[in-house]
Amino acid sequence: MDNKYIAFTDFRFVDEAKSELRSIFGDATLIRPLYGELMLFDVARPYDNAIGAFTANKPTFLYGLLKVSAEVSFNGDYYDIVTAMSSIMDMGKRFRIEVKKVWTPSEETAKDIEVLLGRALEGKGFVADLKDPKVALYVILVNGKALICMLDMDRYGAYTLDIFRAANKRGYVALNRSEHKLAEAVEAFHLVISPGMSCLDIGAAPGGWSHYMLRHGARVVAVDGAWLDYKKLEAKKAIVITDDDGHAMNGIDIAKPYSMPEDIAAYDLVHIKSRAEDAVDTILDKVGQFDIVTVDMNTVPEESAKVVKSMAHAVKSGGCVVLTAKLVNNKLHKLINDAERVLSDDYGEFAVKKLPHDRMELTIFAKRK
């Protein structure tokens, strides 16, 4: 197992992920794809070197990389897995286990298997510690095999096998799936959203990204022609700027675009209920400049980028944009290049990532010049 690694991707982008593997590890030999999202390959490098190359290349379509320490057959009996884990782990190191089921005859949930394996190891004298483990054991059950990986957490930190299960355990209820995308973008692009910041959320409805930023103490201006889910957003003070008659919800202030209150900056959430293209003057006249712009519009990336460009003078120098690029056709490189070209006069330091909660889309990051 000295040279065997497993890489993680999205099954919709396997070909792109393979290309990235070849680019990062020219000496890699792909053994086999494993049920689409996993790729097993050989490369004659120690883990320090491999993970260093992986991180330095900032791959778009690959999520993570683990070294395979053991591989055993699996038909529903966990004895061989426990034996293999016992043979690779230092008795003195506290451990935790994470299991990912990809294709397996086992009827137990991943969580059930984690508990079963943990108890078996404790029975052999090992010490489980979910709060401050020193070693992480990863067990991937796929196609009648158990791939076992081990990570020194003091040295390499933690890795999450099942990102979707972890997202549901974050300790809060996300407003929608899209909110998880912004949480992943914050991690992927090393963003900071904190109290006192001002954020612009374009294409905001029903409000997932706005919810994330409000929870982190930022003030949010949301732009969308549809109503938001104000109850779930839980803003302390919110106002809707709209030409529509009526009211959005009890407790939400309403104002016309031509009669916005002078204290508009005192609101935690300002929803400009209009198309983004029509909101530019309203935003610039009243609410000042922004630290972060987030964009999740249901249009081609180039059009989303044009909206961002039109608002560039409302973004602070050093501020950033996080833009969801909808892959409306299979020419994904052209779609991304077109968006970056539009933004390039005002933005730089571009990065692109396929986030786990992205579907047929990529996320573009750029920093205001």
Image (cartoon, grey):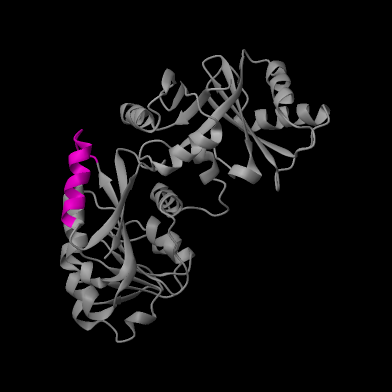
In this view, the residue in front, 348 or 9, is 348
Q: Residue furthest bottom?
A: 262
Give above or below for 21 relative to 29. Answer: below
Horizontal side, residue 157 vs residue 236: left or right: right
| Residue 244 appears in the rendering | no
Q: Is residue 53 above or below residue 18?
A: below
Count of numbered tags = 0
User: Which one is in front, 238 or 335?
Assistant: 335
Residue appearing at x 44%, y 75% in the figure:
196
Magenta residue span? 327-342
201 on left or right of 70: left
Query: Which x, y percent locates residue 326?
Result: 25, 44
Q: Quadrant of residue 95?
A: top right
Q: Position of residue 154 (x, y in %)?
A: 65, 45
Q: Residue 158: tell me if it is visible.
A: yes
Magenta highlight: main SS = helix
Reply yes or no: does residue 130 show up in magenta. no
Q: Quadrant of the C terminus?
A: bottom left
Indicate the position of residue 219 as horizontal and vertical percent values. 40, 71
Percent position (x, y) of residue 332? 22, 38
**Residue located at (20% from left, 57% from top):** 343
User: Is 137 left, or right, of 299 in this rendering?
Assistant: right
Picture residue at 17% right of the left edge, 65% below the top? 310
Q: Which residue is drawn at the image coordinates 73% and 23% (left, top)?
A: 87
Q: Quadrant of the N terminus?
A: top right
